Image (cartoon, rainbow, N blue to C red):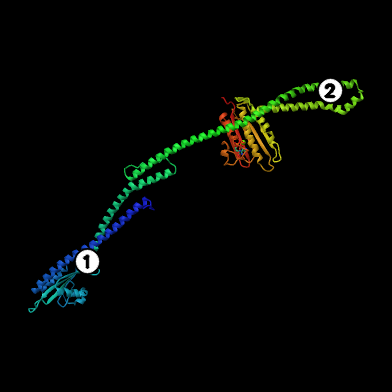
């Protein structure tokens, strides 16, 4: 049977119960019928014996004309335990003697044997006795011929009477039924005990062990590879259990091996990606740094040249102007040509404006010098070692590089930078790399703000503070669209980007994470709320070496 719909823990007891009940019922039925048959046989034997003896005795008594003796015989047989009625009919079927006095002298039709008339006649003719059972099987009747006497001319005796004995089977059968019932009860109890023992046996050897197997298979299917059945013995279930355990062992070993390999592969992939991202970013940053450093260097010389000479220019100009004044004092009436020329060049205005012009030129060259210093500061191209630096300088020079992205354009309003700088000590760090982090995070903030629609004021708030006396914290917060909870756990993954192809490599934050966490032993975290903005927290120890 390939499909059995009931679990063993139900089917075995149910089968045993059914089996026990059917067996008990059948045995009860058989007991009852056997008892009935036995009772009938015993009574019929007894009836045969008593009837033939009594008929013989009666014949003897009649031959000796012992009427009293015959009457005594009938009344005596009536006292036998199972006989309900004893009658002696004469040759005309009239009752001669009866155990019931009121039936005496009655004709057969008025007696309980009325419906056995034909049988009585047959018995009389054949001269042989009969034992019969009533239709309801509750009464047994013995009908025996009794020769009452004969006339001298008769060859055969002419007066043939009939002895009628009625046995009561009902009480005997009821007793037999009770006995059968008691025997069956004992039998059923024994059977129930046997079935219980059988059930216990099957429960221990089959149900319980199969349940263990099922439990173990389910557990294994759910991924618990440590599970074992460990059934003892040498039967089929123990063999299945052994096979199962070996299989589980193998699966566990293979899975562990697989996990190990998977881990190694993941590790390899991770370091590959890391190296790749480092390479790309390093390339990107180094070309940017190189370019910035190159431009700064190129600009530096001519600007220094101009700035340095401006002082002389100012001095010479002052000298020239005082000379012109002197000329005007000594030669108040200049020649026409000189007066015309002075008029044409607006000498008066020129004398007034020239110093101002020089001052603004000086301010301009100073600004250029500042920008050059900032650019060099940002690139820190020549500084790959740990240095004590001012973090604010790094942030400012980064902002300078990103200045062009903060101004308003056709498509977006300007972005305001709010600086909330605290008093920071100099921090021992890899300055160039730290600037790279500021660059990545501020750039991301700008990208996010550019995505905003409407006229909302866009701002990036940069707050610096000392934390726990020997840590520095820089918080860079934008009020952009924020990062969704699904994206948040992935932002530090290498190559993860939500930006369109070509505009983001997805490396900025993963590199920043490496720089802060691995290079500086610091922490980099992100707090973001949809619609409110994103804050990146950069935390690094003040003294890296210590
Ligand atoms: N301030 C921010 N606001 C909203 N989303 C941000 C912010 N910063 C980072 N993200 C999300 O994190 C992702 C990963 O940032 P990451 O800087 O690593 O890569 P990227 O900016 O996409 O590319 P790349 O920096 O290499 O040009 C971004 O694509 C963006 O979805
Ligand atoms: Mg980025």
Quarter holding residue 288: top right
Where is mark 2, residue-wise? Answer: 321
Camera sees residue 468: no
Is 199 on the left-hand or right-hand side of 44? right
State the mark number for residue 92. Answer: none
Residue at position x 79%, y 23% in the image: 314
Ligand 1 - quadrant of the structure image:
top right
Please identify the quarter of the rendering in which residue 73 is found. Answer: bottom left
72 displayed left or right of 303? left
Q: Nearer the viewer, residue 132 or 305?
A: 305
Taking the spot 27% from the left edge, 61% from the top edge, the residue there is: 29
Left/right placement of residue 256 relative to residue 451 reads left
List x then y, in percent, for residue 475.
62, 34
In the depicted view, which residue is nearer to us: 356 or 134?
356
* Rendered image: mark on residue 169: 1
> x, y percentage for residue 513?
58, 33
């Amino acid at each position: 049977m390939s499909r059995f719909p009931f679990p063993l823990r139900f089917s075995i007891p149910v089968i045993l119960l059914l089996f026990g009940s059917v067996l008990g019922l059948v045995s009860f039925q058989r007991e009852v019928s056997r008892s009935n048959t036995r009772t009938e046989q015993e009574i019929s034997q007894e009836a045969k014996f008593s009837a033939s003896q009594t008929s013989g005795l009666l014949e003897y008594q009649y031959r000796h004309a012992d009427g009293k003796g015959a009457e005594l015989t009938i009344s005596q047989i009536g006292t036998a335990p199972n006989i309900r009625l004893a009658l002696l009919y004469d040759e005309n079927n009239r009752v001669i003697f009866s155990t019931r006095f009121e039936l005496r002298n009655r004709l057969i039709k008025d007696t309980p044997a009325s419906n056995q008339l034909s049988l009585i006649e047959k018995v009389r003719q054949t001269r042989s006795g009969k034992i019969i059972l009533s239709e309801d099987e509750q009464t047994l009747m013995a009908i025996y011929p009794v020769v009452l006497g004969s006339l001298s001319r008769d060859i055969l005796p002419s007066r043939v009477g009939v002895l009628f004995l009625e046995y009561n089977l009902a009480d005997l059968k009821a007793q037999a039924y009770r006995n059968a019932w008691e025997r069956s009860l004992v039998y059923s109890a024994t059977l129930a005990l046997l079935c219980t023992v059988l059930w216990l046996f099957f429960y221990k050897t089959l149900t319980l062990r199969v349940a263990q197997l099922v439990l173990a298979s389910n557990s294994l299917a759910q991924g618990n590879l440590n599970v074992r059945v460990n059934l003892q013995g040498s039967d089929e279930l123990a063999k299945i259990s052994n096979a199962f355990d070996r299989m589980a062992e193998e699966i566990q070993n293979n899975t562990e091996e697989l996990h190990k390999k998977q881990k190694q592969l993941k590790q390899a992939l991770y370091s590959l990606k890391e190296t790749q991202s480092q390479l790309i970013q390093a390339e990107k940053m180094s070309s940017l740094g190189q370019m910035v450093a190159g431009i700064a260097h190129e600009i530096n010389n001519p600007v220094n040249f101009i700035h340095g000479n401006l002082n002389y220019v100012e001095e010479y100009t002052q000298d020239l102007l005082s000379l012109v004044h002197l000329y005007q004092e000594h030669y108040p009436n200049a020649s026409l040509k000189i007066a015309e020329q002075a008029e044409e060049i607006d000498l008066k205005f020129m004398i007034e404006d020239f110093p101002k012009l020089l001052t603004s030129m000086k301010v301009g060259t100073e600004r250029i010098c500042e920008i050059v210093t900032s650019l060099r500061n940002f690139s820190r191209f020549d500084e790959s070692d740990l240095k004590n630096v001012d973090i604010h300088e790094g942030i400012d020079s980064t902002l300078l590089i990103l200045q062009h992205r903060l101004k308003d354009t056709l498509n977006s309003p300007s972005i305001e930078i709010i600086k909330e700088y605290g008093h920071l000590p100099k921090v021992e760090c890899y300055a160039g790399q730290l600037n790279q982090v500021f660059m990545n995070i501020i750039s991301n903030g700008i990208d996010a703000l550019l995505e905003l629609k409407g006229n909302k004021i866009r701002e990036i708030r940069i707050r610096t503070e000392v934390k726990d006396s020997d840590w520095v914290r820089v918080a860079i917060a934008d009020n952009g669209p924020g990062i969704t909870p699904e994206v948040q756990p992935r932002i530090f993954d290498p190559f993860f980007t939500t930006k369109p192809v070509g505009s983001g490599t997805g490396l900025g934050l993963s590199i920043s994470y490496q720089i802060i966490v691995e290079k500086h032993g610091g922490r980099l975290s992100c707090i973001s709320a949809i619609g409110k903005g994103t804050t990146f927290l950069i935390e690094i120890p003040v003294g890296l070496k210590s």
